[in-house]
Image (cartoon, rainbow, N blue to C red):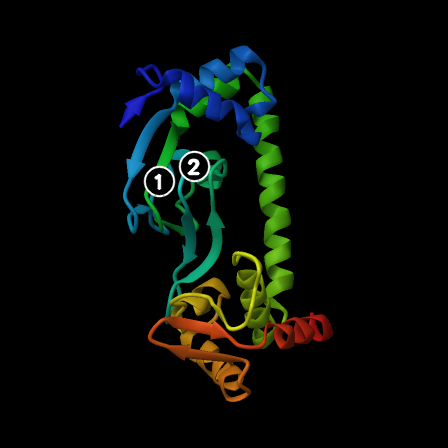
Amino acid sequence: MSTLDSPNRSKWRQFLRQVPFLAGLNEAAFEQVASACVRRELPAKTSLFYEGDEGYCLYVLGKGTIQIRKETASTPLVVAELHAGDVIGELALLDGQPRSATAITTTPCTLYELSRDRFLRCIQDHPELALAMVAVLTQRLREANEQLAHRQMPVETRLVAQLVARLALQPEPQIPPVLLGKLTNAELGRQLSTTRETISRKMDTLLQQGIVKRDTQGLWVLHPQQLQRFLKENA
């Protein structure tokens, strides 16, 4: 853990200046916020905080990927995946309530931590920071509405959409069969906010139809065009 007054100060501040949450601040406001931040390094598969924990700070994700999960009776549901430049934990920071979800690193991460006390002092000195936070919360609301609409789609449609999205990330040209890697039903269930058993049933249908197959290398898509056609007809 280190402050932004260490030898890498210029590099870190340059990154923070590009974060949407901070980009619109005047120089004095930005300097106060940046000076209040503490840099943290976390390995993969590490909890940043758990649902129900006290919310005493927010984080700006500098590098890596973090999953936001909601605990359920069966399996944790992934409600968001955050990347460099995203803000984490702002709700608990503002209202002082416990964390509403769990944050877990999925890759090694660099984060910039801003404590609640320091954040509130910054707002007192620079009220425009409150407007910047409103913009973050507005974006969160939009994303929540989009996720709600997505979850109202049938599971098979969401599954096919996920596979098509992963196909789009593959190197060109996409000559079938296309290997998507060791993508498990449990992982897909977390990403699509459903259970492994539900994904297994839907995946079995795709396997029986010969659209996908599984072997020791992972999940293969044999007929990408059929997935794309299904999505156009049902999305």
Name the element at disc 2.
Answer: strand
Q: Is residue 170 left or right of residue 106?
A: right
Residues marked 1 and 2 touching at CB (< 8 Å): yes
Looking at the image, tell me whether mark 1 or mark 2 is earlier in sequence order: 2
Q: Can you tell which quarter of the image residue 20 is in?
A: top right
Q: Can you tell which quarter of the image residue 9 is in?
A: top left
Q: What residue type is labelled 1?
A: Cys
**Within-10-Å neighbours for mark 1: few <14, some 14–19, many 20+:** many
Residue 119 visible? The answer is yes
At a point 59% along the width and 58% down the height, the residue shown is: 147
The quarter of the rendered structure image containing the N terminus is top left
Label 1 and label 2: CA atoms lie apart by 7 Å
- Return the residue nearer the eye: 5 or 214: 214
At a point 57% along the width and 60% down the height, the residue shown is: 173
Residue positioned most to the top: 28
Image position, residue 137 (x, y; %): 58, 39
**Within-10-Å neighbours for mark 2: few <14, some 14–19, many 20+:** many
The quarter of the rendered structure image containing the C terminus is bottom right
**11 over 165 or under it: above or below:** above
Residue positioned most to the right: 233
State the count of labels: 2
Q: Which amino acid does label 2 sit on?
A: Leu
Image position, residue 187 (x, y; %): 40, 66
For residue 233, which numbered disc appears in the image? none
At a point 49% along the width and 53% down the height, the residue shown is: 80
- Return the residue nearer the eye: 180 or 50: 180
- Which residue matches tag 2? 61
- Which residue matches tag 1? 109
Image position, residue 99 (x, y; %): 40, 46
At a point 51% along the width and 73% down the height, the residue shown is: 177
